[in-house]
Image: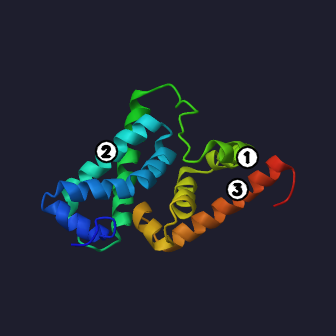
């Protein structure tokens, strides 16, 4: 048997479909951090993001036998995460009048790196917040999760050409915003 760290996601899903909890644990460890970052970019609340990661993994556990391999496992998983995050945001917007609190992000970098890049990070965060939800989503998936355009298209449920267009316009808007903040042309 292969080392669990080397087993493919497809292999883990097949084992999960048979009720193998060790496969679920490995799958969870492998995908927890990128899922958390993606969901956090959608819901802007670290506690909600943590809850949603658990919900996504529970859905993956329940749906493992139905995975048909028409997309990469990662795309399938991020698609589940996207739908769960959208449902949560919609639900909260119907039940909550107050805005989401800022400062709930849990950065995944060390303190020295954070201090050295705080000014740039604040500028990028500010400019990212100015993007539309669709543009933020594709930028996050492309540049933070390193997914291909075809994977992003599957997750966002749109044509690959639309993903390319959204990334083009998002990059253009980010460049203009950052130039305005720094006072120079990028």
Position of 107 with respect to 35 (left or right) is: right
Mark 3 or mark 1, earlier in chain: 1
Q: Which of marks 3 and 1 is in front?
A: 1
- In what quadrant of the picture does the N terminus appear? bottom left
Q: Where is residue 8 in the image (x, y as percent from the top left)?
A: 31, 71
Does residue 65 appear in this view? no
Residue indicated by mark 2: 54
Above or below, 107 relative to 14: above
Going 57% across and 62% down the picture, which residue do you hit? 143
Q: Where is residue 71 in the image (x, y as percent from the top left)?
A: 34, 72
Q: Nearer the viewer, mark 2 or mark 1?
A: 1
Q: In 3D space, how far apart are the residues under numbered discs 2 and 3 (Cα atoms)?
A: 32 Å
Residue indicated by mark 1: 116
Most foreground residue, 53 or 171 = 53
Q: Where is residue 111 in the image (x, y as percent from the top left)?
A: 64, 42
Mark 3 neighbour density, 10 Å: few (under 14) some (14–19) many (20 or more): many
């Amino acid at each position: 048997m292969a080392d669990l760290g080397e087993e493919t996601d497809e292999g883990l899903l097949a084992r999960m479909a048979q009720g193998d909890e060790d496969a679920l644990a490995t799958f969870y460890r492998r995908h927890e951090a990128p899922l958390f970052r993606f969901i956090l970019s959608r819901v802007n609340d670290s506690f909600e993001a943590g809850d949603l990661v658990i919900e996504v993994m529970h859905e993956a556990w329940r749906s493992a036998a139905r995975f048909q391999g028409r997309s990469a496992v990662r795309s399938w998983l991020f698609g589940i995460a996207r739908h769960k995050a959208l449902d949560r945001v919609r639900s909260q917007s119907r039940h909550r009048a107050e805005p989401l609190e800022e400062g709930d992000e849990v950065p995944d970098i060390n303190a020295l790196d954070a201090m050295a890049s705080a000014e740039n990070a604040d500028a990028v965060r500010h400019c990212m917040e100015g993007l539309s939800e669709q543009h933020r989503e594709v930028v996050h998936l492309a540049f933070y999760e390193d997914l291909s355009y075809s994977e992003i298209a599957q997750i966002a449920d749109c044509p690959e050409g639309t993903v390319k267009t959204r990334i083009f316009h998002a990059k253009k808007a980010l460049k203009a915003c950052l130039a305005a903040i720094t006072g120079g042309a990028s």
